Amino acid sequence: MTKIAPEILGESRTVADIYDVYKMRGDSPGRRGYLGASNIGHFCDRYLWYEFRHCVQSPFSGRMYRLFETGDLEEARMVADLRGIGCEIHDVDDAGEQFEISFLGGHFKGHMDGAGLGIPEAPKAWHVLEFKTHNKKSFGQLKLHGVQESKIKHHAQMQVYMLGTGMKRALYLAKNKDTDELYAERSKFDPAYAGTLKQRAKRIIESSNAPERGSTKKDYYECKWCDARGLCWGTEAPEPAVPIASLSCRQCCWATPMNTDDDKRTEASWCCEKYSKTITDTGCGKDCPKFLMLPSLLDAYGEVSEHKENKDGTEWVKIHNKESGVTWKYGTAKGCHTHAVLMTTPIAVIANGLVATAQEEMEAEVEVVDRDIMDRYPIPDCCIKWQGRKEDLAAEWKKLYGKDPVSEEAPINKCDTLGHIAVEYEGGRVAIVYPNQITWNAMIIEGKE
């Protein structure tokens, strides 16, 4: 008899394939083009700004996408439950879609689960309907503390929908996914609070700078699991300096959201001030030669000390690194770190003194070689003067040669490959940084061509 135990231990191929389908479907629609009412109650303005600028994307698994669908499927059942007790329920508009609530030129939106009349506690009042599912723990907190205290984002969401529809009441109907128990709670419209939420959305949408964090502590529990943690607080090696999955015009200095004072307009639009035209696809930033990343995306590492546009139309900003004291350039001009480098290279490499020096001087003094410097300096034929951590490289260089590599040495060549960064100095001296090395990740060698 064939043993099947090995086949049923852990995740089977069947389950894995099912999850793969959900993952493919879930990832394919693309990012929404507006700040969502469902998230406006989030504790952190900066996270909402990152989300609106398409800087963060939650890495959901196929299982999680299926779980989200479970919540969506429950909505139809709750509509049927309410109709079953005699309520008049409208869950879709004339086009068969969920009711869309839109503000600020279409940049701030939400989709209401429905509207209901005949709710037993107040049968003559129209109610905004909001349906949610909870696990056992979350459901217990909801029953103990109510929506406003235990589910602030859900409370804020309903306030926005009441503001947009003119209804003064909302019904929150929730299900315990473990026991199928239901919980219902009615909420009153709070015009002052709803107005504050709309003002918050407008401030976030119109800002070209990242707002203040919701917490001043990196180890705050909300920050620990936040999808924007690396971008907000700074990444750790070997993660890239700017961990953005894909570029968008929304992350560019020249992109501006339009018509934010027009609540009647439902389709959001953006303007590129560089080309003086409407942006139809804000995901096209990766293909734009004028793309210049918003300096706020580098807030975790440094302060912008200078911005310059060259005669040839290229631009750069100068970033002063807080920890190392090194200043380096980012931009489209020759000799600058590009956004592609920032999205693939750890900050420790970018802000390294020797590399920063080469980048700083490259435009005027350093010839970038077409081939790898290490082709001319094979390690077996060279003298290894030092090997260790890249953070110690500058100090070790000064010990060996008596000069500070940042202020007193002038590099003559530089190469940047996927495996290493090498900077060549007079006398056949080469400093090498290996970004992907975990133990030692820097060397100083001497050799001859």
Image (cartoon, helix red, strand yellow):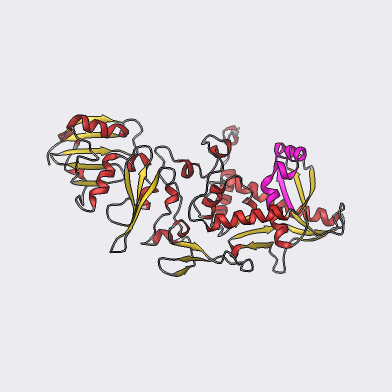
The magenta stretch spans which residues?
A: 130-156
Q: Quadrant of the C terminus?
A: top left
Residue 57: x percent and y percent? 52, 49
Q: Is residue 425 above or below residue 210?
A: above
Is 150 a magenta residue? yes
Residue 233: x percent and y percent? 47, 41
Name the side, left or right, on which 189 lies relative to 436. right
Q: Is residue 178 visible?
A: no
In the depicted view, which residue is nearer to us: 75 or 396? 396
In the depicted view, which residue is nearer to us: 32 or 5? 32
Name the side, left or right, on which 393 lies relative to 65. left
Q: Is residue 258 visible?
A: yes
Name the side, left or right, on which 309 lies relative to 13. left
Q: Is residue 243 above or below residue 124?
A: above
| Magenta residues, dominant SS class | helix
Q: Residue at x 53, y 38 (%)?
A: 216
In the depicted view, which residue is nearer to us: 408 or 397? 408
Residue 362: x percent and y percent? 23, 50
Q: Residue at x 38, y 52 (%)?
A: 339
Residue 338: x percent and y percent? 34, 52
Is 425 a magenta residue? no
Q: Quadrant of the N terminus?
A: top right
Q: Residue at x 61, y 47 (%)?
A: 42
Q: Residue at x 24, y 42 (%)?
A: 422
In the depicted view, which residue is nearer to us: 79 or 230? 230
Q: Splitting the image into 4 quarters, where does residue 110 fall?
A: bottom right
- Give the mark count: 0
